[in-house]
Image (cartoon, helix red, strand yellow):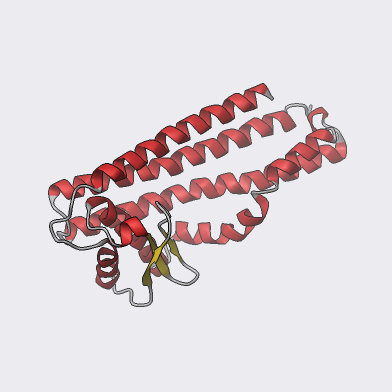
């Protein structure tokens, strides 16, 4: 168990460092004002129009770094700091979220796969750890019947969350690539503004990478605890 706490601590530390770096990057590039004077909302609306997407709305949502695309109601949700701001950070985030809308409109396979996993993960992710614990208490580590299979069921649940984390990686990286390509090809930003947008999105992607590695490490650890006692 001590090894598990050490693992959790290491993952939490790396996640905190990357998250802080991301916030620092966005704060820094929020001072790089766009020469075209467009707000995040205007950037998003133009990118949607340039891709021929007419059925997606751009709306403001409360909070910081709460930006997301909702495929259910087809809305690009931009945080208050992005929706109204006119800087490199806002341009990067707005274009990235529209990148997801473009993925949805073109039936991007990785986004489709992730969407199919959402209802499963929403149910299993919160209970997987408890199911594994329950199985271990029932004797899973010793390879005893019912406890073993209960723990395996928990591992399967945990596996769905890990799979979701890794499928999220190509989805996020692709959305950023679409965003940066559009910003560059349409001359929406200067060279300095583009560099800022690229750097900000790079750090945003790393938060998903850390989450995926952490999810995998946790799964492997508990799989070893459950399956290790099996002959």
Residue 200 sits above or below residue 104 on the image: above
> Residue 154's x, y, as percent?
72, 44
> Residue 150's x, y, as percent?
79, 43
Q: Quadrant of residue 144?
A: top right
Residue 39 sits above or below residue 3 on the image: below
Q: Which residue lies most toward the top here? A: 2
> Residue 84's x, y, as percent?
28, 62
For residue 9, say whether it is visible: yes
Residue at 84% across, 32% down:
139
Is 148 situated left or right of 85 in this image?
A: right
Q: Which residue lies most toward the bottom here? A: 54
Q: Tell me the quadrant of the picture where the C terminus can be found.
A: top right
- Seen from the viewer's position, the closer of residues 210 and 147 is 210
Residue 207 sits above or below residue 53 on the image: above
Is 32 situated left or right of 123 in this image?
A: left
- Seen from the viewer's position, the closer of residues 129 and 172 is 129
Q: Tell me the quadrant of the picture where the N terminus can be found.
A: top right
Residue 32 sits above or below residue 228 on the image: below
């Amino acid at each position: 168990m001590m090894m598990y706490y050490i693992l959790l601590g290491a993952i939490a530390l790396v996640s905190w460092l990357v998250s802080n770096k991301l916030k620092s990057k966005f704060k820094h590039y929020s001072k790089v004002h766009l020469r075209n004077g467009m707000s995040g909302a205007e950037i998003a609306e133009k990118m949607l129009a340039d891709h021929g997407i007419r059925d997606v709305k751009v709306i403001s949502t409360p909070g910081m770094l709460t930006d997301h695309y909702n495929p259910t109601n087809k809305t690009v949700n931009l945080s208050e700091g992005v929706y109204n701001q006119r800087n490199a950070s806002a341009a990067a985030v707005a274009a990235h979220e529209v990148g997801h809308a473009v993925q949805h409109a073109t039936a991007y396979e990785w986004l489709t796969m992730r969407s199919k996993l959402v209802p499963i993960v929403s149910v299993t992710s919160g209970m997987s750890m408890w199911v594994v614990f329950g199985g271990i208490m029932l004797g899973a580590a010793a390879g005893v019947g019912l406890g073993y299979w209960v723990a395996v069921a928990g591992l399967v649940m945990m596996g769905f969350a890990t799979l979701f984390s890794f499928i999220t990686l190509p989805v996020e990286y692709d959305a950023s690539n679409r965003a940066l390509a559009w910003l560059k090809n349409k001359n929406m930003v200067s060279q300095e503004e583009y560099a800022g947008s690229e750097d900000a999105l790079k750090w945003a992607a790393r938060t998903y990478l850390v989450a995926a590695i952490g999810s995998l490490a946790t799964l492997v650890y508990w799989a070893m605890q459950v399956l290790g006692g099996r002959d």
